[in-house]
Amino acid sequence: MYEDGPNPTKVQITPAYKRANPPPPLVLIHDGGGTTFGYFMLGNLYREVWAIHNPHFFDGGAFEGGIDEMARLYIQYMKDTGIKGNILLGGWSLGGFLSLAVARFLAEDPEATIKVLGIVMMDTPHHLPWSQIDGPTDDPVIENIPPAIQKCFERCDEMIEHWEVPRWDGPACDGKVVFFGVGGRRYSVPPGKVLYKPFEGVWSPVEVSRYSEPAEEASQSGRASITPPPTVLIRAIQSMPLPEGRTEPYIIDKHRHDRTLGWSANAPEFIKAVIDVNSNHYEMFDKMNTAQIKDMTAQLNVALEILDSIGNGVKPSFGGKPKLDYF
């Protein structure tokens, strides 16, 4: 990532042994600080990986159209780079919001040449416009942030003050039982549950809150129903420490103890699996913590395995010894 450099930038290439039948490329979108440095520290993800940085990182400029303008621009960036067909999207923090916005715009475009098969959100909590929230909406002050990154954070705060997350007509995968594979096993996950892996724990099904508000009515406009891609959430389990005398969590930790970070109760169902990592939000890509980066690489590969299997239509096998775990 450098001024006047390519955007998106190719971070990894498909290994030679996978090029005959390559997995869908992964496009990772920057966090609120505008950079993609953390994505370059990741280990092998065994596929083509691209990273999109904030084009205003170097000049401090603003997107007058906010998050939606950014998402539309990033779609054009992908097209200009030659990215097409089936892809996976992902991002840390703000990158998760942008992934959802990009996916929504592509899904509603009948002439889109890019199809989002799935999303990996890295500690992206559910968002309400800050202007609609009672109580504190601040985040901790992080020391020694370079001025360009600080400016991006400030621009980010301005944009999400009133921005609403994309709306969908209904749940992912038509609200049906989803079959996928991970770690050599196959699982089925029905509506109302996610497959959950605690840090240093094993996979298990857990019930989550159900979204009860009516979804948008596609029939009112005569268009086809638009639903979100299946998503895997990588969740940090540590909250940011509070200063003496403060009892309210920072806004980034408002949903910290909810396994879906607030999404299941506030949006049509789209998160199919949740993976915990032993970190707080701001240290998920700590360049000084090689063990953390190694774990993020491992968990991201697990998330990609899940999304690949959903995209490939993993189905139950009833012949011989059962291979499918029903939840």
Image (cartoon, grey):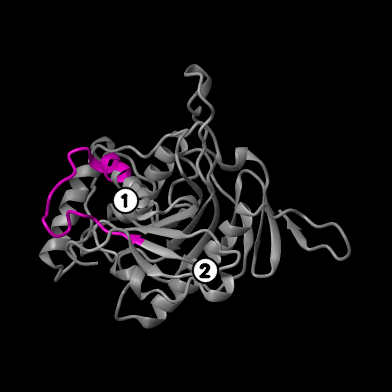
* Amino acid type, label 1: Tyr
User: In the displayed structure, does residue 83 sit left or right of residue 215?
Assistant: left
Q: Is residue 119 in view?
A: no
Q: Secondary structure at mark 2?
A: helix
Q: Secondary structure at mark 1?
A: helix
Q: How many labels sit on residues?
A: 2
User: In the displayed structure, does residue 154 sit left or right of residue 309?
Assistant: left
Q: Residue furthest right?
A: 320
Image height of 180 relative to 104, above or below: below
Q: Nearer the N terminus, badge 1 or badge 2?
A: 1
Q: Is residue 259 in view?
A: yes
To which residue does mark 2 refer? 301
Q: Nearer the viewer, residue 321 or 308?
A: 308
* Amino acid type, label 2: Asn
Question: What is the span of residues highlighted in magenta in the rendered image?
Answer: 51-72
Image height of 33 relative to 192, above or below: below
Q: Nearer the viewer, residue 148 or 282?
A: 148
**Which residue occupies 42% across, 54% down?**
83
Of the two numbered discs 1 and 2 in the rendering, the one whose residue sits closer to the viewer: 1
Pinpoint residue 88: horizontal percent, then vertical percent.
Answer: 48, 55
**Which residue occupies 66% across, 61% down?**
181
Pinpoint residue 1: horizontal percent, then vertical percent.
Answer: 24, 67
To which residue does mark 1 refer? 77
Disc 1 to disc 2, how far (Cα)? 25 Å
Pinpoint residue 80: horizontal percent, then vertical percent.
Answer: 33, 50
